[in-house]
Image: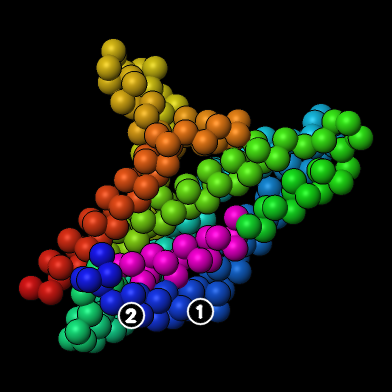
């Protein structure tokens, strides 16, 4: 892939995107909402149930990412189009894949820190757990990894949504719609007949997160997140290519 893509250009765009995201008030609001809501709901449940696990975090976070990720990605490309800087990028010797990967990697770096902040909970629980009980670190790390992969997947869909509209609000709505489909289709898989039920269950992010949350690292789950993320990045490249003509 490096034969066709200048990785230096990708990382330059990634750093620029990451810096712009970190400096944005939207990122601050999303982070406060994300951590604040999880802390507000999970902490009382943890002390009430007296259960040494982060299952509550794994249950809450996907619902929050459903809105947080589209909010973080809505301006990645739409803002460039609205401000006219995309036309400037189009005149530079940049490949569409370089633009898409640079934008995505910048977001992915922020997502890594966002999910990484949740490490606080297993560390806290491990310190509070009764001797001999302990924390299932395999399940905890699987949960955090699953949430990170969901971030990447949602981020790719949000990036594609951002490439479809000049208006960030429209891009946000489209991103939420895309995330909604893959968030709920697995939960309603029982409504589909026969083989379609299995397909719907596989397309939903829930079944893959549940597997990882048990500490089971199945190659099929990694293939799912990797292929779906790549698919929407490819859609973004096709969309950018169409804007050049």
Q: Main secondary structure of the magenta part?
A: helix
Q: Is residue 52 left or right of residue 61?
A: right
Q: Is residue 132 left or right of residue 216?
A: right
Residue 164 shows up from this direction: no
What residue is shown at x 60% (from left), y 55% (from top)?
Answer: 115
Residue range corresponding to the magenta coloring? 100-115
Q: Is residue 149 left or right of residue 158?
A: right
The dot on residue 19 is 1
Marks 2/1: CA–CA distance: 15 Å
Closer to us: mark 2 or mark 1? 2
| Camera-nearest residue between 185 and 225 | 225
Whether 67 is drawn above or below 42: the answer is below
**Image x and y of residue 218, in percent:** 47, 33
**Hey, which residue is sitting farthest top in the picture?**
194
Q: In the rendered view of the protein, which quadrant contains the C terminus? A: bottom left
For label 2, the residue is: 9
Helix, strand or loop at mark 1: helix
Helix, strand or loop at mark 2: helix
**Hey, which residue is sitting farthest right in the picture?**
131
Q: Residues within 10 Å of mark 1 (few under 14, many from 20)?
A: some
Q: Quadrant of residue 76?
A: bottom left
What residue is shown at x 21% (from left), y 86% (from top)?
Answer: 92
Q: Are marks 2 and 1 in contact (CB under 8 Å)?
A: no
| Camera-nearest residue between 166 and 198 | 198
The stretch drawn in magenta includes residue 113: yes
Q: Residues within 10 Å of mark 2 (few under 14, many from 20)?
A: some
The dot on residue 123 is none
**Image x and y of residue 193, in percent:** 29, 14
What residue is shown at x 39% (from left), y 81% (from top)?
Answer: 12
| Camera-nearest residue between 211 and 37 | 211
């Amino acid at each position: 892939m490096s034969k066709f893509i200048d990785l230096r250009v990708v990382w330059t765009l990634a750093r620029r995107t990451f810096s712009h995201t970190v400096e944005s008030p939207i990122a601050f609001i999303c982070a406060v909402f994300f951590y604040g809501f999880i802390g507000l709901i999970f902490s009382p449940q943890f002390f009430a149930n007296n259960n040494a696990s982060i299952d509550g975090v794994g249950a809450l976070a996907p619902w929050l990412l459903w809105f947080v990720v589209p909010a973080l990605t809505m301006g990645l490309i739409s803002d460039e189009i609205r401000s006219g800087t995309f036309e400037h990028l189009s005149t530079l010797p940049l490949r569409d894949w370089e633009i898409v990967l640079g934008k995505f990697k910048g977001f992915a770096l922020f997502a890594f820190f966002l999910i990484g902040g949740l490490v606080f909970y297993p560390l806290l629980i491990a310190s509070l757990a009764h001797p001999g009980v302990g924390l299932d670190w395999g399940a905890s790390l699987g949960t955090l990894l699953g949430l990170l992969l969901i971030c990447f997947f949602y981020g790719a869909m949000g990036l594609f949504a951002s490439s479809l509209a000049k208006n960030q609000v429209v891009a946000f709505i489209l991103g939420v719609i895309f995330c909604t489909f893959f968030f709920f289709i697995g939960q309603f898989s029982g409504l589909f007949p026969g083989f379609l039920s299995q397909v719907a269950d596989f397309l939903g992010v829930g079944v893959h997160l549940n597997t990882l949350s048990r500490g089971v690292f199945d190659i099929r789950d990694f293939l799912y997140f990797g292929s779906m993320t790549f698919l929407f990045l490819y859609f973004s490249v096709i969309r950018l290519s169409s804007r050049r003509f």
